[in-house]
Image (cartoon, coloured by chain):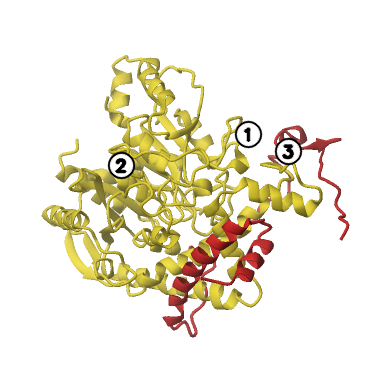
Chain colours: A yellow, B red
C-alpha cells in the first residue's frame, strides 16, 4: 500500500475509512518482525477530517520523545518503566494536526549509536536485509518507514541520527536547522546539537511534517522566533540556476576518512548529473576543517551528555538499585545498573574532558574548532546555495562489524556531524543501490533556515528517479 | 590504552561502578578515542572564539507567572519510592 500522505489523503477522500487503513498496519506493527517498535499505542479510529493537515496519517515516534501516559524508554533499562506526565511539543502539534500516533520506535540507548545495536530492547533489523544494521540512532524510526509500518516517523539527530539510518534504510530523513523545532520533551543527549526531524517515504511528506512541527515554543528557550514557510510549496520549484557545491574534502581519502565505497561514489556522481540536467550549476568547493569534525563532535557531544545524563540518579524517576545502602551507593549502583556500555563510555569521556585540568585542552579547544568548522560553511555559502555530499562512506554494514570498535563506529559519522556542529539543516534522500541491493542516499546541506532549498533539490532528485 | 587509575577516576567522577572486565575494556576503547581526539592539537585556534551555541538567539523574557506546573501526584507516579508526598531516599549520612 502507498503510505505517502497524498495517497492516504486521496483514499480517505474517496471514502476509505481510517480503520481499513490502520488495521493491516497495526497487525504488522504487532508482529514487529524488525523490532522497530518498543511500545505500541492503542489508537482509536477517528473520522477523516479534511480540515486537518495530517488527518488519519499514521506516524511513529522515536522513543526518546515523551508522550503523556505512554511509556517512553529511550531504549534504556534506566527508563524501562517511565510513563511521562506530559507530551513533547512536537507530539502536541502532531495531535492537533490530526496525526495518529501509532507507537514508539526502538533506538540506540539515549540516541547514542550509529547501528541500533545499543538498545536495551534488542537490535533493529534493516528492512532491506536483516543481516544488516538499519543505522542509528533513529534505526527503529527508519525501519518503521522503510518496512511500510507507518506513513512517517519523527526521529532526533545529534550527529546524523536521522540522516544516517534514512540512508541505510532507503527513506527520506531531514535534520532541520537548530532551533527550528522545539526540543521540549526530547530526552536530551547533547543540547547544542540535538534536533527533532521527520523520516518519510517522500520528500514532500518531510516538508509537510516540518511545517507541522516547526515554530517557536515558550517551553524551549533555544527554539527560534522564525516564520515557518509553507515548506511543501518548495517541492514544485525545481533547481534551475541553483548553485550546488560539492566539497572536495568529502571525497579525498586520508587516514581519518574511511574510503568511499564504489556504490556511494557512483550514486553521488549520478545525483550530480541529475541536478545538472535539471538546470543546477555544480561547483567544487572546500570545507578545510572537515577532518577535525569527528574529534570535535565526540568532545562536545560527550561533555554535554555527561551533564544531561547526571539527572538519572535513581531518586526522582528511572531505575533505582535495590541494593544501595547510602545515597552515594544509590547514585552509583542505579546508574551502573541502568546504563548500557556505550552510554557509560560517553558519560565517562564527557566527564573527563570537563574535569579540572582537561577543560581547556579538550573541551574549550573543541569549541574553538567548532567555530572554524562553522566558518567553513559560512564562507562556502557565499559561493553556493547548497551542498551535495555522501551521507556515509559506505552503505549499511553487517551486525557486529563495528560494534567492538567504538572509534570505527564514530568515524562512520564523518559526513553528517559537521552539519550539527554548525546547526545547519540537512537531508538524506535515497538515490542509489549497492551491489548487495542495499539503499544508498545522498545528503543535501543548505544554509541556516533555508530548508526550502533541500525540498527543491530533494524533489528534483526524486523526479529524476521517476518517483511519482 | 590509558592507565587503570584514569578509568577508575573517570568512573568515580561519573558516579559509575565498573567491574574489572569493564575497566580493562574502557582502558582500551577510551584510550583509542582520546588518542584520536589529540588530532585537534594540529589546529591553530589562536584568537578563535569558542562556539557555545550554534545559532544566534534573541534572549526572550516572559511574564513572571507560574503556569503549566505538573501536579505532585503525577510527578511522584514515576518515583521509585515516595513517602508523604515526597521523594524517599536511603539514609543520607554514611559511616565514612
Where residue A399 sits: x, y (%)?
36, 46
Q: Does residue B48 appear left or right of residue B73 in this picture?
A: left
**Residue A401 circle label:** none
Image quadrant assignment for residue A426: bottom left
Which residue appears at 66% of the width and 50% of the height? A335
Task: Give the farthest residue toward the left.
Answer: A277
SS type, badge 1: loop
Image quadrant assignment for residue A77: top right
Which residue appears at 18% of the width and 57% of the height? A262
Which residue was labeled with disc 2?
Answer: A171
Where residue B48 sits: x, y (%)?
48, 80
Which residue was labeled with disc 1?
Answer: A83
Q: Does residue A401 appear left or right of residue A99 in this picture?
A: left
Mark 3 surroundings: few (<14), some (14-19) or many (≥20) residues within 10 A = some
SS type, badge 2: loop
**Chain letter of the residue carrying label 1:** A
**Number of callouts in the render?**
3
Which residue appears at 47% of the width and 68% of the height? B32
Mark 1 surroundings: few (<14), some (14-19) or many (≥20) residues within 10 A = many
**Chain letter of the residue carrying label 3:** B
Which residue was labeled with disc 3?
Answer: B79
Q: Earlier in the sequence, mark 1 or mark 2?
A: 1
Q: Are marks 1 and 2 in contact (CB under 8 Å)?
A: no
Where residue A361 sits: x, y (%)?
55, 78
Q: Are marks 1 and 2 on the same chain?
A: yes
Work out whether residue A312 can be spotted.
Answer: no
> Closer to the camera, A286 or A366?
A366
> Closer to the camera, A69 or A328?
A328
Q: Are marks 3 and 1 on the same chain?
A: no
Amino acid at each position: 500500500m502507498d503510505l505517502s500522505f497524498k495517497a492516504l489523503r486521496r483514499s480517505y477522500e474517496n471514502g476509505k475509512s481510517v480503520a481499513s487503513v490502520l488495521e493491516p498496519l497495526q497487525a504488522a506493527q504487532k508482529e514487529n518482525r524488525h523490532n522497530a517498535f518498543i511500545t505500541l499505542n492503542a489508537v482509536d479510529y477517528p473520522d477523516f477530517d479534511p480540515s486537518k493537515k495530517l488527518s488519519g496519517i499514521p506516524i511513529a515516534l522515536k522513543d526518546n520523545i515523551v508522550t503523556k501516559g505512554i511509556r517512553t524508554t529511550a531504549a534504556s533499562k534506566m527508563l524501562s518503566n517511565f510513563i511521562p506526565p506530559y507530551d513533547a511539543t512536537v507530539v502536541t502539534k502532531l495531535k492537533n494536526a490530526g496525526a495518529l500516533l501509532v507507537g514508539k520506535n526502538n533506538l540506540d540507548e539515549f540516541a547514542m549509536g550509529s547501528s541500533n545495536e545499543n538498545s536495551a530492547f534488542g537490535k533493529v533489523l534493516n528492512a532491506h536485509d536483516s543481516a544488516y544494521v538499519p543505522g542509528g540512532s533513529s534505526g527503529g524510526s527508519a525501519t518503521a518507514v522503510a518496512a511500510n509500518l507507518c506513513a512517517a516517523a519523527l526521529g532526533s539527530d545529534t550527529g546524523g541520527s536521522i540522516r544516517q539510518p534514512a540512508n541505510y534504510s532507503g527513506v527520506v530523513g531531514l535534520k532541520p536547522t537548530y532551533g527550528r523545532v522545539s526540543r521540549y520533551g526530547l530526552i536530551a543527549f547533547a543540547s547544542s546539537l540535538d534536533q527533532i526531524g521527520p523520516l518519510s517515504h517522500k520528500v514532500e511528506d518531510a516538508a509537510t511534517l516540518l511545517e507541522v512541527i516547526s515554530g517557536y515554543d515558550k517551553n524551549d528557550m533555544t527554539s527560534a522566533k522564525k516564520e515557518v514557510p509553507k515548506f511543501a510549496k518548495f517541492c514544485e520549484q525545481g533547481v534551475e540556476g541553483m548553485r550546488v557545491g560539492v566539497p572536495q574534502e568529502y571525497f579525498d581519502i586520508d587516514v581519518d576518512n574511511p574510503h568511499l565505497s564504489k556504490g556511494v561514489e557512483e550514486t553521488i556522481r549520478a545525483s550530480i548529473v541529475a541536478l545538472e540536467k535539471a538546470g543546477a550549476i555544480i561547483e567544487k568547493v572546500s570545507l578545510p576543517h572537515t577532518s577535525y569534525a569527528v574529534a570535535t563532535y565526540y568532545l562536545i557531544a560527550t561533555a554535554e551528555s555527561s551533564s544531561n545524563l547526571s539527572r538519572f540518579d535513581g531518586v526522582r524517576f528511572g531505575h533505582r538499585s535495590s541494593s544501595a545502602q547510602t545515597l552515594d551507593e544509590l547514585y552509583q549502583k542505579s546508574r551502573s545498573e541502568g546504563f548500557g556500555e556505550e552510554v557509560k563510555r560517553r558519560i565517562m569521556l564527557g566527564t573527563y574532558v570537563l574535569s579540572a585540568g582537561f577543560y581547556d585542552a579538550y573541551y574549550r579547544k573543541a569549541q574553538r574548532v567548532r567555530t572554524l568548522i562553522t566558518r567553513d560553511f559560512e564562507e562556502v555559502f557565499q559561493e553556493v546555495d547548497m551542498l551535495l555530499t555522501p551521507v556515509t562512506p559506505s552503505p549499511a554494514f553487517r551486525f557486529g562489524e563495528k560494534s567492538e570498535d567504538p572509534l570505527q563506529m564514530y568515524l562512520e559519522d564523518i559526513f553528517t556531524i559537521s552539519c550539527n556542529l554548525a546547526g545547519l539543516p540537512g537531508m538524506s534522500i535515497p538515490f542509489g543501490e549497492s551491489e548487495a541491493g542495499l539503499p544508498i542516499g545522498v545528503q543535501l546541506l543548505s544554509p541556516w533556515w533555508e530548508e526550502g532549498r533541500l525540498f527543491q533539490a530533494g524533489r528534483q532528485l526524486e523526479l529524476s528517479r521517476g518517483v511519482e | 590504552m590509558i592507565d587503570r587509575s584514569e578509568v577508575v577516576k573517570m568512573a568515580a567522577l561519573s558516579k559509575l561502578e565498573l567491574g574489572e572486565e569493564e575497566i580493562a575494556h574502557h582502558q582500551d576503547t577510551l584510550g583509542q578515542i582520546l588518542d584520536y581526539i589529540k588530532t585537534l592539537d594540529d589546529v591553530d585556534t589562536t584568537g578563535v572564539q569558542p562556539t557555545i551555541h550554534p545559532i544566534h538567539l534573541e534572549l526572550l523574557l516572559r511574564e513572571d507567572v507560574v503556569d503549566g506546573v505538573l501536579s505532585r501526584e503525577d510527578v511522584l507516579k514515576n518515583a521509585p519510592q515516595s513517602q508523604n508526598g515526597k521523594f524517599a531516599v536511603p539514609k543520607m549520612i554514611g559511616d565514612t
